[in-house]
Image (cartoon, rainbow, N blue to C red):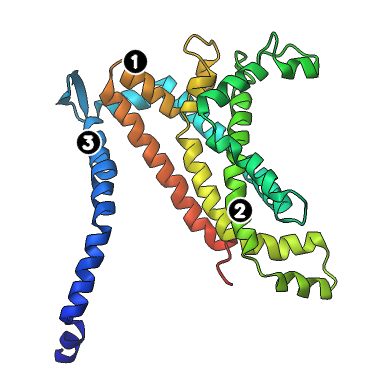
Amino acid sequence: MNSKAIRLKLSPAEKREQNWGWFMVAPTIIGLIILNMWPFIQTLYASFCEHLGFGHYKFIGVENYVNMFQNADFWKATWNTIYFCILTVPVGIFLSLLVAILLNAKIKGKGFFRSVFFLPMICAPAAVTLVWRWIFNSEYGILNQLLGTSINWITDSKVVMITCAIVAIWSAIGYDAVLLLSGLQNISKSYYEAAELDGAGKVTQFFHITLPMVSPTLFVVLIMRLMASLKVYDLIYMMVEDTNPALTSVQSLMYLFYRESFVAGNRGYGSAIVIWTVLLIGIVTLVQFIGQKKWVNYEV
């Protein structure tokens, strides 16, 4: 016991170093508490209350959650959010990995192409949306002109979700490709040289070397893209107007939260939607972390 106590005792120099460490991380911890933890606690409390206006709330228990689970619009928004993830995440990650592999190849002007693919991430979302709304316009849009069709890409409830998914995938490919490119560049060339000596082709090298070695980065991109898709709001808000008859077919959970909290003024009900969304993100993330053991390779 005495030897253990002696080992745990810090010298004055070690104490000063520890104090400096806490001092350096204090701004981040304080910011996390003020900007993330405290607002979440307030939202959790508000989800059990009725908003009376001017920041006043009345505790009503689980009534907001009961009304939420009995509301058809809520379940429709939940399905729309999940459907949006199904449309955007697999296709987006596949295209991002494809772009990353092409940018990692020996081609001329790689720096230029990297900038071009990353450009959507630095453009204003409102400007991007306006351009895509013009492209998808049913009367004079360039897409219908090229295809020779008259599809109502934004107002048809059957295709509006696909339309929004296309814009979301296009906007995220560059950022995800840059992250995956960094993972590809960390793969040692000796693996490929050894595979070529053994007679392995490009396809075999991809599935047995590239994919396993880039899987940690791929896992991070997958988690980020799932979270972003489950929280989608601004894209749908700018692509689909309130008067659009197809709004119910694309309305996400965050869009429903906006309508209930800031349009209808029912912030207690809106807070319950936020808590449900956080719970949904937590479940999806937990499943991914459990499943990563089967396909993510952390061995160097």
Q: Is residue 183 above or below residue 44?
A: below
Residue at 27 percent across and 39 percent down: it is 40
Q: Which residue is mark 2?
A: 180
Dividing the picture into quadrants, the one containing residue 201 is: bottom right
Q: Amino acid at mark 1?
A: Val
Residue at 19 percent across and 68 percent down: it is 19
Q: Which residue is mark 3?
A: 42
Query: Nearer the observer, disc 1 or disc 2?
Result: 2
Q: Position of residue 289 (x, y in %)?
A: 48, 56
Residue 263's label in the rendered image is 1
Q: Amino acid at mark 3?
A: Gln
Q: Amino acid at mark 2?
A: Leu
Residue at 57 percent across and 19 percent down: it is 130
Between the C-alphas of marks 1 and 3, the distance is 20 Å
Q: Position of residue 138 (x, y in %)?
A: 68, 11
Query: Nearer the observer, disc 2 or disc 3?
Result: 2
Q: Quadrant of the N terminus?
A: bottom left
Judge left or right: residue 41 versus residue 115. Answer: left
Q: Position of residue 197 (x, y in %)?
A: 83, 75
In this view of the protein, which residue sits in the foreground, 185 or 44? 185
Residue at 41 percent across and 23 percent down: it is 256
